[in-house]
Image: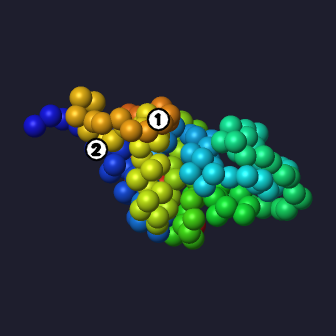
Amino acid sequence: MQYNPYKVVDKFEKMIAEWAGSKYGVAVESCSAALFLCCLYKQVGEVTIPKYTYPGVPCSIINARGWVKFDDRKWKGIYELKPYKIYDGALRFRKGMYKGGLHCLSFHMKKLLPIGRGGMILTDDKKAYDWLKRMRFDGRRQKRLEDDKFDMIGWNMYMTPEQAIKGIQLFSTIDQRGN
């Protein structure tokens, strides 16, 4: 049996998804990558976001062939990329935080789970989960390269096993109540 280093990424995804209250988690390299993949999946058109947000958010929308409309809404921790049920939750990390849709997280060094780099997409949608898992891994399935049949083009945006290990270690040190 061959060792699969990506099993630790699967473990991290399941751990965070369960804690957050979603069925699935898809670990990626950053929250911007998570937002980009979600926008591609939803095939966004016009997306309305708060004018005071991180610059990577409108960049992710535009790179996914959408266009941005800014509004004056006030937000704290999370907001929706309207009307698509995509949520930028980069500033919120709490137990039971998932409330539906495609919920994107950040594990930047300044965040509540400071892996240093990384993000995740939470969802209850199995079809979205399967698509997002492949798209973040060059369109590949999680199998040996020579055993895969390539039928879609993806991006190289997966979380490395080293980041997942650090996430698992740090997760055990945070306040698990999510207060």
Q: Position of residue 12 (x, y in %)?
A: 38, 50
Q: Residue at x 58, y 59 (%)?
A: 103
Q: Position of residue 97 (x, y in %)?
A: 56, 67
Q: Compared to 48, does 140 lie above or below?
A: above
In the image shown, does 167 or 125 lie closer to the viewer?
125
Give the amino acid type for the residue marked by disc 2 in the picture: Lys
Quadrant (top left, top right, bottom left, bottom right) of the N terminus: top left
Q: Answer with mark 1 or mark 2, whichever residue precedes in sequence.
A: 2
- Mark 1 Cα within 10 Å, few/some/many (few <14, many 20+)? few
Q: CA distance from mark 1 to mark 2?
A: 23 Å
Q: Compared to 40, does 101 lie above or below?
A: below
Q: Quadrant of residue 149?
A: top left
Q: Position of residue 44 (x, y in %)?
A: 68, 52
Q: Quadrant of residue 100?
A: bottom right
- Answer yes or no: is residue 161 visible: no
Quadrant (top left, top right, bottom left, bottom right) of the C terminus: bottom right
Identify the element where label 2 is drawn.
helix
Give the amino acid type for the residue marked by disc 1 in the picture: Ile
Residue 67 left/right relative to 12: right
Mark 1 sits on what residue?
153
Q: Compared to 34, does 102 lie above or below?
A: below
Q: Residue at x 44, y 59 (%)?
A: 127
The numbered mark at residue 14 is none
Q: Nearer the viewer, mark 1 or mark 2?
A: 1
Callout 1–callout 2 Cβ contact below 8 Å: no
Residue 80 left/right relative to 33: right
Residue lying at the far left in this picture: please name it.
Answer: 1
Mark 2 sits on what residue?
7
